Amino acid sequence: MAARVSGRLSQSLGVFLKKNALSPLGYQSSESRHAVTSLRPEAVAGWPQAASWRVAGLVPVVLSELPAFMGGPNGVHTMSWERPLAWHGRKLATVAECLQVSDRLNGGSGALVLNADLFLGPEFPAALSEALASNGPVLFTRWEIAHWPETSGARPNEFGWDGVWVPHGQLSHFQSPRLALGLPWWDYWIPYKALRLGLPLTVVSRKVCFHETHPEVWQEREQRELCAAVWKDLGYGPIRRKLHHLFAPKSERKIYGYWNHLAGEIRRRIRKEARFIE
C-alpha cells in the first residue's frame, strides 16, 4: 500500500515538474514566444510598449545590465547581457546575443528580436505564424503613427523594419559583435546577408507593428561606421571595398562607396526578391 502511494506521489511530482520545468536560464517554460529587446534600466518599469507585446501573445524580455528576473514591472522579464557592445561610452546589447537568448528561451525553435519602441497589434501572432512557413528570416514592416493606440492613419516606413525572426538553424549566420539594438543598420544587415546567402526572406507588410514617429537622430559618422560593420561581416574590409568600388562591374561600384547607396541597394533587393505577406 505504502509503495503504491509512494509511486503515485512520484508520478504526480514528475508531471508537476514537467509542466513547470525551468529553462537553463531559470525561466518557467511557456507556450508563448519570447521576444527579446533592450532598454536602459530606468526605462523598464514605465515601458509602454510591453502591454501590447503581451496582448500579442509574446513574453517581453529585456537584455541589459539588469540582473535576471522573471515577471518584473509590466510582466517584463529581464536578462543580464554577457557580451555588450561598447559604443562611444555606452553599452548596448548586440543583435547576435539577443538572437541567441530569444532562441534559447523559445526552446531552440527560433529567435524573435524587436526594437523596444514598437507597439504590436493583436494580429501579430497570426502574421508571424503565416510567415514561418517560408523557413527563413522574417522582417516586419514598421507602420508610422502619431500616438498609440490610434492606428487608422498609419503609413508604412520604407526605410527600416525594427523587427526580425530568424530560424534556429540559421542563427550561426548572424553573429556580428558590431551591430546592436539601439543603433541603425542591424535591420539592413540581416536581410542583406540572408539574400546574399540565398536564404528565403519574408516581409510581413501587414499592419501589425507600429511606431510613434520621432525625428531621426543618427549622424553621418555613425551611419558610415555601422555600414562598415555590415561590410566587414560580409568579408569586405576597407581595402577590398575600395578595390570593388573602383573595379567591380559598373552597376555595382557605387554600393561599395557611400553608405546611402548600399542602403538603397538593400531596399531594392528586398522589394525584388523577398516574399511579402500583406
Image: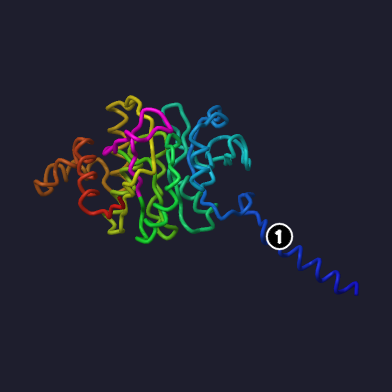
Q: Is residue 263 left or right of residue 211?
A: left
Residue 44 at x, y percent in the picture: 55, 32
Q: Is residue 219 left or right of residue 44?
A: left
Which kind of residue does numbered mark 1 sit on? Leu
**Any magenta on residue 155?**
yes
Residue 176 at x, y percent in the picture: 39, 46
Q: Which residue is mark 1?
A: 17
- The quarter in which the N terminus is drawn is bottom right
Q: Residue furthest left?
A: 250
Residue 20 lies in what quarter of the image? bottom right
Q: Which residues are magenta?
A: 139-159
Residue 237 lies in what quarter of the image? top left
Q: Residue furthest front?
A: 152
Residue under the image location 36 percent in, 54 percent down: 137
Residue 112 at x, y percent in the picture: 45, 49
Residue 219 lies in what quarter of the image? top left
- In the structure shown, which secondary structural element does the residue marked by tag 1 occupy? helix
Residue under the image location 66 percent in, 59 percent down: 19
Q: Nearer the viewer, residue 221 or 269?
A: 269
**Any magenta on residue 87?**
no
Q: Is residue 256 left or right of residue 209?
A: left
How many numbered circles does the render carry? 1
Q: Nearer the viewer, residue 223 or 88?
A: 223
Q: How is the image coloured?
A: rainbow
Residue 269 at x, y percent in the picture: 21, 49
Q: Nearer the viewer, residue 131 or 168?
A: 131
Residue under the image location 50 percent in, 32 percent down: 48
Q: Is residue 169 left or right of residue 18?
A: left
- For mark 1, does the 10 Å Cα neighbourhood hold few (<14), some (14 to 19), or many (20 or more) residues? few
